Amino acid sequence: MKLTLVAGLVGAAVLAGAQLNVRNHRAYSMPFLRMGFPDLKIQRGERVWTYELTIANDYREEPRNFSPVVVEDWEMQRVQLGLHEHDWFIEGGVAARNGGALDAVIDWWHRLAFSYQTLRDYSPHGQTRITSPGQRSFGTAFGLTDVTVGARRGPATVAIKLPLGNPRQLLGSGNIDVGASVARSWQQGRWGIHALAGLVWQGRPKELRAAKTWIPQQQLGVSYNISSSKRLSIQWQSEPAAVKVGAAGADSMHNSLVFGLRQTFKNKQVLDLYLVEDGDFLFYGRTPSLANVGADFTIGARLSVRF
């Protein structure tokens, strides 16, 4: 029975191309390359431009005793542009880190959805602080991000990140990263299962200490086709901390959940809307293997246009 099921899944496998390409947005992870699902299936001769807006907001204190040594309190708005063809792609963009406008909205969301308060409820809104032992402090920032260039062949992707972002503003690492991944999808009727395994070599960053060299990635998603043009999905993502800061929570596995809606239009445009939640979503600390460390709240929209 098991062999029959495995054989059926392998026989039905198709290249991943209908799942969300979303990363963990913790501040110390953002300067480094991360591998993701291919956004769309692209035929030879086709060209796809992507336009993405992401807003991520985070609040982290450790230890949680109102005398923290690790503080991450910030909001980032990131605009990313990409050009994708059948077997290669390039992506880059602009990012701003500031106090933002979502602090009050997230406080309301926590009280409404989860009926509990967190440390962010007792913190002033609109701050921008990233501090931890042994690391330089970071505050507001604006500028170019690093640029990623990649190639695809079958289910495999390889990519290199080029250091264009300013490492003194934590908009880049100041060095190259190299990554590889394999992504597969299985479709049965309206339901789909999507899996990715990746590995990233992080070049030594210029402004961060205790960065890890190798980062393995795992992603597993389930999707449901509401109709021929609408798809819902939920995606689990997992990777270790990019940088050790000496705090048990912040240095633990970075697991998060992504909830997405894909709308395909008749003029070949595809719109992805997504929400990413860390451990707050499942009552922080109770289900760390599902959702643990990431930005507190991330929302985004990605428009893909075929030519």
Image (cartoon, grey):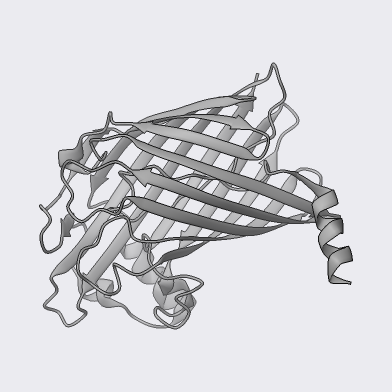
Residue at 56% in and 52% down: 197
Nearer to us in this view, 99 or 202: 202
Quadrant containing the N terminus is bottom right
Q: Residue at x 87, y 57 (%)?
A: 8
Is 282 left, or right, of 142 in this rendering?
right
Residue 207 percent location from the top left of the image:
15, 44
Is residue 246 placed above or below 202 in the rendered structure?
below
Asked if one can make out residue 125 in the rendered structure from this viewpoint, the answer is no
Q: Is residue 102 above or below residue 252?
A: above
Q: Which image quadrant for residue 63?
A: bottom left
Q: Give coordinates of residue 250: x percent, y percent.
A: 29, 68
Q: Number of labelled discs? A: 0
Residue 294 falls in which quadrant of the image?
Answer: bottom left
Q: Nearer the viewer, residue 230 or 2?
A: 2
**In this view, 15 is above or below 103:** above
- Residue at the (46%, 50%) spot, across then down: 23
| Quadrant in which the C terminus appears | top right
Residue at the farthest top position: 45
User: Which x, y percent locates residue 264?
Assistant: 71, 38
Q: Give residue 50's position: percent from left, percent from top.
A: 53, 30
Say if residue 277 shows up in the picture: yes
